[in-house]
Amino acid sequence: MTLQAAPSASNSLAPASAWAVVPPLGNLDAYITAVNRLPLLTHEEEQRYARQLRDEGSVEAAGRLVLSHLRLVVSISRQYLGYGLPHGDLIQEGNVGLMKAVKRFDPDQGVRLVSYAMHWIKAEIHEYILKNWRMVKVATTKAQRKLFFNLRSMKQGFKAEALDADTHRETLSEQEIDLMAEQLNVKREEVIEMETRLSGGDILLDPSPSDDGEQAFGPIAYLADPRHEPTAMLESRQRDRLATDGIAQALDTLDPRSRRIVEERWLHVNDDGSGGMTLHELAADYGVSAERIRQIEVAAMKKMRKALAEYA
């Protein structure tokens, strides 16, 4: 995408291309220097370009609005360097927020783009930090997000006061916790929980072996519980279903004689704990040989296995 500069405008943006402001070789310092040289737009120019974008969909107007506010992104991104993330990535995410703000900006609202864009720039940077600060996301709710981005600065202020008073504390006092909860309009328990999350770190549940072949010790060694292992739980649940509903459905596929033989041979238990009727007892009951009862039992079990397989 190429943006042609207006030759007659005295304060037109210097580069003819939107990408000309990005120096070669990815030099971040050169990029910051370049965007700081881009001239700011007057209120009248901003209004004119914003209306051209809104009414005509002018890409050139959008480019001029974005380029003239790149320095704002650089300035805001510096406020988040304490999270240990690359400055270039923070600027990149902030630029995404700036482009979203330019797209949604309404010049008839009576505000300057710089004021409107700050919200979108910070929102994109906040989202990037929350996703990348740690492997496990530490803030998901609105209250947790507020705590995440305010707890650190407030805690640093408390530390500064403690140093002035010649006291050294790493944890928050009860009074400081209550003060934070009141100022941020959150529950006291939420302040304590977020402080615990921020003071901790990510730990691998199952660390890989070290270079010398030694198995590293991880929480998986004492957190594992075979009774609650997902595969074992699924298998146990499946066995329970087969032993109840599955058996009942398989028995329904048998004729009355075959069903009684299976029930007496395998499912009936006497009060003294002994099993059901023997082959000879069933043979005498039906007036056939014990071998015939065995054949009926084998055929019935085969039919039940097929029914159970279909049920499973």
Image (cartoon, rainbow, N blue to C red):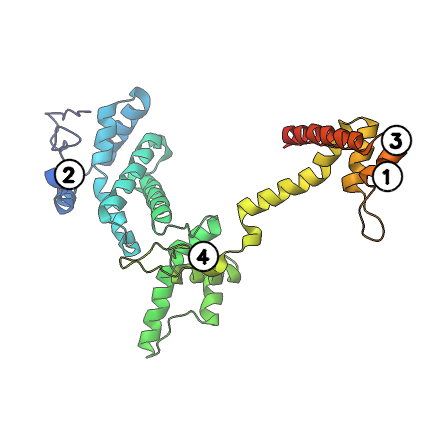
Height in image: 220 above or below 87?
Answer: below
Residue at image coords 11%, 40%: 25
Residue placed under numbered mark 4 in the picture: 220
The label on residue 245 is none
Instruction: Report whether 80 appears left or right of 193.
Output: left
Mark nearer the N terminus (3 vs 4): 4
Q: CA distance from mark 2 to mark 4?
A: 55 Å
Q: Residues within 10 Å of mark 3 (few under 14, many from 20)?
A: few
Q: Nearer the viewer, mark 2 or mark 4?
A: 4
**To which quarter of the image does residue 40 belong?**
top left
* Residue 204 point in image, percent of width and height: 38, 55
* Quadrant (top left, top right, bottom left, bottom right) of the N terminus: top left
Residue at image coords 25%, 28%: 62
* Residue 234 point in image, percent of width and height: 58, 43
Height in image: 261 above or below 125?
Answer: above
**To which quarter of the image does residue 148 belong?**
bottom left
* Residue 253 point in image, percent of width and height: 75, 26
Residue placed under numbered mark 3 in the picture: 286
Instruction: Report whether 298 appears left or right of 148.
Output: right
Mark nearer the N terminus (3 vs 2): 2
The label on residue 38 is 2
Q: CA distance from mark 3 to mark 4?
A: 60 Å
SS label for mark 1: helix
Q: Nearer the viewer, mark 1 or mark 2?
A: 1
Q: Nearer the viewer, mark 3 or mark 4?
A: 3
Q: CA distance from mark 3 to mark 1?
A: 9 Å
For badge 1, the amino acid type reads Glu
Q: Residues within 10 Å of mark 4 (few under 14, many from 20)?
A: few
Q: Nearer the viewer, residue 188 or 218?
A: 218
The label on residue 281 is 1
Mark nearer the N terminus (2 vs 4): 2
Q: Are marks 3 and 1 in contact (CB under 8 Å)?
A: no
